[in-house]
Amino acid sequence: LVDDGSVVNIAVDNTAMRVQLPLDGSATCVAVTSMVVKPETPITLYHSGKLDRAVVRRKLGNNLYEIVRVEHSDTVKCRLNEAYYGLRFFRTLEDMEAHRQDYLRQLTVDYQLVEDAITGIMLNTAEQLIEIDLVSTHIQGSRQPPNIQRACMAELRTVRALADRIMCDARDEVCLGREFGRRLTQPFLLRSIAGSGKTWMMRQLTYYLARDATHVCAFAPLTIFVQDLAQLVRSGRVRIAPSFLKEYIQETRNGSERDILLQLLELKSLCIIFDGLDEASNLRTDLENVILTVIVPLRMQVIVTSRPEGVDLSRSEYQRHYVVYELAPLDSENREILISQHLRDNELFDKLLQFSELRRMHDAKYEEVFTEAQRAKIEAISGPTKKPQQVSFHGGSLRRHEQVSSRYLSKIQGAFLGSGAIERLDDVLADVDTYRADKEGAKGRLKQIALELVEPTRLVFERLGEHLLTAREGETPSKQRASELWPEICRCTDELFALAESCHGRCSRWFQDHAFGAKVEIAEYLKDPVRVYVKAQNDYNGDMSCVTDVIRARILFYDAGGLCVFFDSCDGVDLARIKNKFANLDAGHFRNVLTNLSFCSDDGVTHIVELQLHHKDIFDLNEMKHGHDLYEFLRARLDLKAQTKEDFKSQLAAVLDTFEDICQVPVLLSLLVVILKHGPRHRQLPLPQSRLELYQKAMDFALR
């Protein structure tokens, strides 16, 4: 037979015994060369699906020998081939098997615990749940080699599946005609970028093969780390030559381990794993030639890992014989497993992972509910983009009122006076200031007071207490009392709330008239005065006229078309500002359009309201996954040194982009573990916004 230009001689037994030739497409044959085996040579050979000890008596012609089987005390005629026999290194088969079992047991011990090279944490291979996915890659211009790449070989998805397939073939091939040179071996090439988990995967594979090979006749794995091999070659202890495997075993192994590996090498029953072919540097081409032209043709099981640039897939040997796999990036499940092995219940990582997954889900939902044409239209919507400080909102700066005129503030003020809530809040704060009382205990006392109040007074009281307790933390703590701050809040916000009340009815009617059947949700209460005051102080230098969301509403559109045409009929109002988050994504990829609309109050004064436009499916997804809560958590825990809210969102987006990049590569994920493990657990943590920052921060924390 002719297979890719090599002559394959197959002996046919023409006696009454029927012999099935290995031509069913599920295996390949070993090219037979003219062999000379001297009489009285002790050999080990496969015969009738078992290993036998034998001694060569004489040659009968053309690779046909008369041999004596020691265990059976009989004489048989056999055609010897490279896949059929090997020189004998052990006195008995029992000795050989005992030493093989010892070698396999030692491998399982050596590879059971693997040290993470970056974090130093020892991981138990036997308990690993991480399975880096494999993706089969078709070599451009190649064809499926006959009898080599069986379909199942290109359908493996995990290292465990790869190990199971190799073990299955190792069990079956002993009984399927090694007498005829038949081998069920398949060379594999695993390619991926640096740090993606190739070496870790090969350690897993070695462990699985050693553990499972105890029940397979004459089989064992041999893992060769090419970087170590290259050092041996450069020192002159091993040569890159056809016999280099034998030299490597003799140089690196001793005693019975050396003998069993040499025996299995003779029997072509080793599974040889070359990890890091690209790391051979200037020796790579010579080593690759020996693997492709010497070892693979012997039909030993060969697995090679390399970076993409470390192998030349245009070589005919790869195109004819190899199944090529790429390592897929870590999925979310394996990221969680990996991080849980390093950090138990790390809340920050969990929230980052949840927020990252929500971003992906938002992207998918957007593709699902908007057609391509609708996406183009909604992303093209634009309008005024000035910031509140750059435009005269609410008719200019607002006056301070000594007497409360707003019905909303008057209601809250009356509830505070009737319950004595402000005085009781001051008592709690005094205990914190004087006796350094536990702040958690103080929060508990405030909750008890809040339970006696009704909305919206309860919410305002909780916000007031939270603000005053927070002000007592940090480098310059404040001891301001509630009885001082609350009247100041009322004086500063009263005119703003009075304007909002005069426009509220007109706004509500306009929202309903322009919703086109969509769902309109108007906030039950005006924005709480504590948040209005704090926002103006922090963001607008105390100018209350820049706060534009005292009246807040949203319209939830059931279909994308309604949202796209909303701005075609905005009669009766002026668009003060449009913030299109379909075109300019925020950190969480939560897509909506935020608008500020200008209404006139009954006395002709301009008032600005906030209207959010959402697609209901996208909005519901964000609510179900607690998108806002995740954002607020990250805002509190990340140290991004942002000066404004917009700066923070931009930097958070950079952190999340880098985080998602990190999480796909195990070695980068280990660097992140160093930061999370050694960084402050209860204070703000500086996370990297680029790969360069990742290396810098990880080294900084490691050196500390």
Image: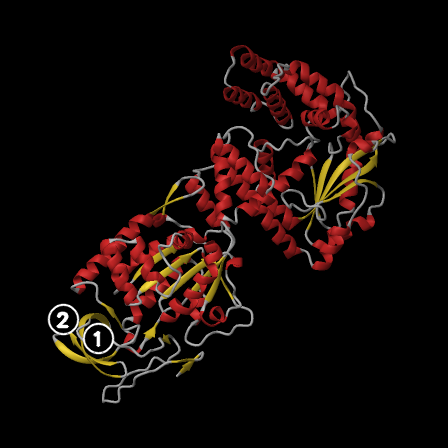
Q: Mark 1 points at which residue?
A: 38
Q: Which of 268 and 608 is in front in this view?
A: 268
Quadrant for the N terminus in the image: bottom left
Q: Position of residue 596 (x, y in %)?
A: 77, 38
Mark 1 to mark 2 CA distance (whole Å): 21 Å
Question: Residue 540 appears in which quarter of the rendering?
Answer: top right
For mark 1, give the secondary structure.
loop
Residue under the point 62% across and 17% down: 476
Measured along the vertical axis of the image, is residue 65 above or below residue 165? below
Q: Name the residue under label 2.
A: 71
Marks 1 & 2, CB-CB < 8 Å contact: no
Three-letter amino acid code of the residue under disc 2: Glu
The number of numbered badges drawn on the structure is 2
Regarding residue 46, the answer to whether it shows in the image is yes
Q: Position of residue 275 (x, y in %)?
A: 42, 56
Three-letter amino acid code of the residue under disc 1: Lys
